[in-house]
Image (cartoon, rainbow, N blue to C red):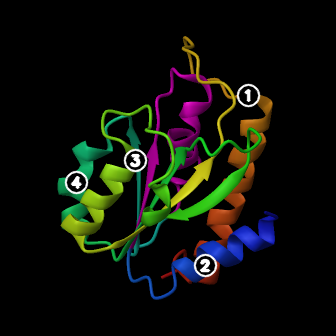
Amino acid sequence: MHKEELVAKLAEKLRGVKKLAVLGVGNELRGDDAVGPLLARRIRRLRSPKLMIIDCGVSPENYTGMLRRFRPSHVVVVDAVDTGSPPGTVEVFESYELVGLPLSTHKVPLRLLAEYLEAALRCKLLVLGIQPGMLGFTDRPSLSREVEEGLRLAEEVLMEALSRLSLLYA
């Protein structure tokens, strides 16, 4: 999917957003699995009372109290998601589309996290997934070239969708 198609898809699925939480999920010491936390750090400079950005690492379930207090209408989880696509491929999923995907590398599988957050927060949850290539252990955050390109694309897609939805300057 091209950038403009991804932006349009994400913006459409976020239509009606009142408050948005973006959760970067992943293990920084497992190669391309670091993509979620790295994206969260790249965009954490954004300021808006309608936007919360959290680097959740491998334990997004630890942030549910903070999310409850923020009360988002929508949540976007950014994570490495194995869809069998070429490494670096960026895709937008709704929670129900996670059913056929492999279990995640995190303590709580992404599908279960999505179901829990949607029920607990009464929000719509989306996943901005980047296909990993390398998931081996490393001694520092290190992305493959393809996933670094996917990270840049995912950041551009998210920024453009947030801008279209007037979430950056509210």
> Does residue 64 lie above or below 51 as drawn?
above
On the picture, is 39 further left or further right than 5? left
Check disc 4 and report the residue beneath it.
Answer: 64
Check disc 3 and report the residue beneath it.
Answer: 110
Tag 4 secondary structure:
helix
Which amino acid type is shown beneath numbered disc 3? Leu
Q: CA distance from mark 2 to mark 1?
A: 28 Å
Residue 45 falls inside the magenta stretch: yes
Which span is picked out in magenta? 20-46
The one nearer the camera, 83 or 141, is 83
Do tag 3 and tag 4 residues touch (Cβ < 8 Å)? Answer: no
Which amino acid type is shown beneath numbered disc 1? Ser
Check disc 1 and report the residue beneath it.
Answer: 144
Local crowd size for mark 1, using a 10 Å CA cut-off: few (<14), some (14–19), many (≥20): some
Which amino acid type is shown beneath numbered disc 4? Thr
Q: Which residue occupies 51% across, 85% down?
A: 15
Mark 3 / mark 4, whichever is N-terminal: 4
Q: CA distance from mark 3 to mark 4?
A: 14 Å
- Residue 11's disc number: 2
Do tag 2 and tag 4 residues touch (Cβ < 8 Å)? Answer: no
Which amino acid type is shown beneath numbered disc 2? Ala
Mark 1 / mark 4, whichever is N-terminal: 4
